[in-house]
Amino acid sequence: METFRYIVKRVLQMIPVLIIAIIAIFLLMRLLPGDAALATLGDKIDPKVYEALKEQMGLNASLWTQFTVYVSNLVQGDLGSSTIYKMPVSQLIASRMQVTLCLALTATIFTVIVALPLGYMAGVKKDKLPDVLTRIFALIGLAAPSFWVGLVLLIIFGVNLGIFPTSGWGKTWPEHFEALILPGFTLAFSSIAVVIRNVRNNVVDVRNADYVDFGRSKGLSSWVISTGYVLRNALIPTATLLSMRIIGMLSGSVIIENIFGLPGIGALLVQSVTGRDYATVQACVMVFVIITLVVNLVTDILYSVLDHRIKLGDEK
């Protein structure tokens, strides 16, 4: 019951954040040069056609009127229509959502299965060869830009070796899976480096803690010490970091989807900003904000599960 009350409280706290985000993106889009009518018509513009299209799109109305119409439709569940794709934005978002979520999930899986074992091994083998090699790998991951990593992987595994597709999403789930490998690892590359360093440092600190020495003095097995004492406590701060990296990977999907030609929300956002598709941009940003808020909520709940000293709803 206490957990339920905490979740309800957090959801209510999300509402003002979402409102601020909606207002901010609405204003920012209208501050950009040009408008949706100009982007639709292109370079050769007939002034009469331009004015007629602006009137049809409601762009001649005052900013306040446009905002009230947008909010009124939003409250009714109407996200508007795309001026580029000529279809309801809700359908457009739904068709692109699975690509971005699958990409973020793939990147998260890569981060966990690569960073946690390497970080733990580096912490246990402090200052030995595995630790040195792991730290070098992490340093490369921190220094290499995502777009550069993506291009290198594309050239090696896509163009030269032909193991993975160079672009596109495919039509079947096996094709989707293949299409996600390179962009997923590219998106995860910097996160892997950050999490490796975090886990490694946490393991080093925890292994020197008094309660670990106490566990050893009681004659507990190395497995119990490693999993129940070292790994569990080392992962507590990593949980928060991982949630921040997931949020970062969602924003990074904007670049990665365009590099690998994936039809996700990130690619849609870039196309919509370029085409001044106000309704689609506002919906894309709103989706990213909601996902960010939900990830933060899940992280807080997970944190309380990993560390029983933390109770949901406790005032810090």
Image (cartoon, grey):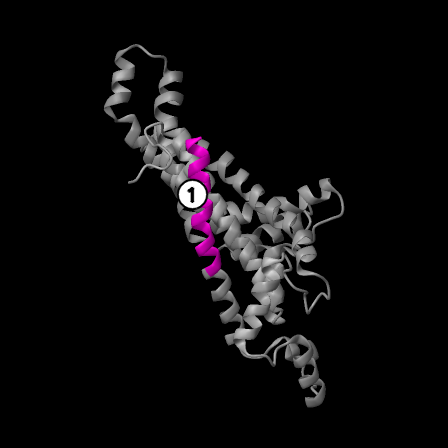
Q: Main secondary structure of the magenta part?
A: helix
Q: Say whether residue 203 is visible.
A: yes
Quarter of the image with the C terminus in it: top left
Q: Nearer the viewer, residue 22 or 65?
A: 65
Is residue 180 positioned above or below 118 on the image?
below
> As drawn, is 120 to the left or to the right of 161?
left
The x and y percentages for residue 24 are 47, 66
Q: Nearer the viewer, residue 157 or 216?
A: 216
Q: Nearer the viewer, residue 131 or 94?
A: 94
Q: Which range of residues does the magenta coloring cover?
A: 1-19
Is residue 46 positioned above or below 57 on the image?
below
Tell me the element at label 1.
helix
> As drawn, is 246 to the left or to the right of 52?
left
Q: Residues within 10 Å of mark 1 (few under 14, many from 20)?
A: few
Q: How many marks?
A: 1
Is residue 147 positioned above or below 65 on the image?
above
Quarter of the image with the N terminus in it: top left
Q: Is residue 155 magenta?
A: no
The x and y percentages for residue 261 are 65, 57
Which image quadrant for residue 194?
Answer: top left
Label 1 belongs to which residue? 9
The x and y percentages for residue 58 are 64, 76
Indicate the amino acid at tag 1.
Answer: Lys
The x and y percentages for residue 285 are 54, 59
Task: Write the residue at 43% across / 44% down.
Answer: 10
Q: Nearer the viewer, residue 311 or 140?
A: 311
